[in-house]
Image (cartoon, rainbow, N blue to C red):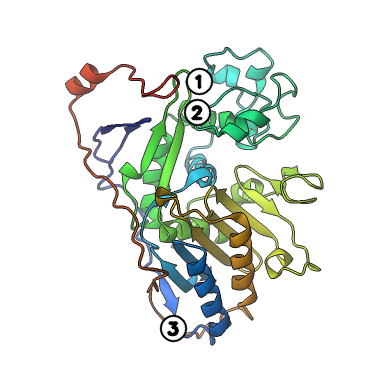
Amino acid sequence: MSEIRKLRKLGTYLFAFWLFFSGADTTISQDWKQHLDVDKAGWSSSELKTAKDYAASINSSAVMIVDHGNVVAAWGNIEHPYKAASMRKSIYDGTIGAVNFEKPFDMETSLEKLNIDDLDPLSQEEKQATFEQLMMARSGIYHPAAYETESNAERRPERHSAKPGEKWYYNNWDFNVVTAAFQKLSGREIEDAFAEDLAAPLGMEDFDPGHIFKWFEPRISRHSAVTFRISARDLSRFGKLYLQKGRWNGKQILSPDWIKRSTSFLTTFPEGHYGGEGNGYGRMWWVYPARPGSEYPYETYHRVAARGTGGQLMVLFPELDLLIVHRGDTDQGNGVSGGDLFKLLNMIVKARKTAPTKDALLGPLRSEPLSDKKPLPLRDDYSAISEDEIDRLEGSFMFSDKQGI
């Protein structure tokens, strides 16, 4: 069993509980290997150089390209844990899937059975929404949510305008309540499950429990948003797990069936909605069909993506066994626009000519700088406190009319 220590960090909007692990049963992770000669690995070095220069020009903070499990290119601060933003949702999927693989629970369990409610009580119909419908963003529950942007709040459908499972809406309420429902189904907090069931066995070298926070808005909702920081190289390990059908170093961590369902077209968008006809959503993953006739190389392949504001992106190309991770430094306001990111992705995919050969020479991971800009150092001034101190501090602390801890 892991050694347990309770941590609590007080800060604006944040209140986190941590389970540190030591001595846990983990799988020793492989170190990254990088191609020594990208031309012999099936890529154009000159076209990659052009892509790298463009990434620098648009203020990209980190990029990793992994083909058949090995690194083709690594640019920028690949070790820095930038904000994941909405990529947190895809991380939820992997965490829930890992726990469900070891100890299955019923994905069709309703909110009523889980005794989940909110400040504005759920109606009897809303309580029939299931755990999986939350993951699919199809609960039909249109309530205010913590960590919700103004634009999302403005787009929120009218309450009771859809029954559970009937319509898709990119709903922070669903994604926040997923973590509460997961705790009731599994008996574990999602941050602890991520640390033990994904970060440890995958060998995430930059992970620290302090990189996960709970964002509360207690006058908006009972349910917090569990937010993540994660580095490009740790995120690449997560994506590699999906491309390997859930298997890592000989151990099955995720079920292939889980991955297949989560990355399937459970919702398909109509023309003009979320990027065009045929794009869709699975369980907390964006999915895109191959468009062989497209003028854009990036679009000619089927893709699965985790996305977040400011240029946070991990895109998987299952048929190519390829993944691309891109990070923007939103801590310093250096986000990357969708248009610039799309252009960069096309340049990268165009640089791939063939799959790497089995005899391609490999060496250790090495990252080339994109600029002289350094990420802001993360605060590490939190510490373990006693149970008595926790009891003394317990309560509500408001920072504004709607945000607090």
Whether residue 215 is situated above or below residue 87 in the rendered picture: above
Whether residue 129 is situated above or below residue 175 in the rendered picture: above
Would you identify the image quadrant in which residue 273 lies? top right
Residue at the disc numbered 3: 36
Give residue 259's position: percent from left, percent from top.
60, 50
Instruction: Looking at the picture, tell me which residue is in the foreground, 358 or 147.
Output: 147
Label 2, label 1: how many angstroms apart (C-alpha)? 7 Å
- The reply to whether dot 1 and dot 3 touch (C-beta < 8 Å) is no
Counting residues from the start of the chain, the first of labels 3 and 2 encountered is 3
Label 1, label 3: how many angstroms apart (C-alpha)? 52 Å
Give residue 309's position: percent from left, percent from top.
54, 47
Res. 146 mark: 2
In the displayed structure image, the side of residue 32 where residue 94 appears, left or right: right
Counting residues from the start of the chain, the first of labels 2 and 1 encountered is 2
Task: Mark 1 vs mark 3: give the one in front.
Answer: 1
Instruction: Looking at the picture, tell me which residue is in the foreground, 335 or 138.
Output: 335
Identity of the amino acid at label 1? Ile
For disc 1, the neighbor class at 10 Å (few under 14, some 14 to 19, many from 20) is some
Res. 107 mark: none
Label 3, label 2: how many angstroms apart (C-alpha)? 46 Å
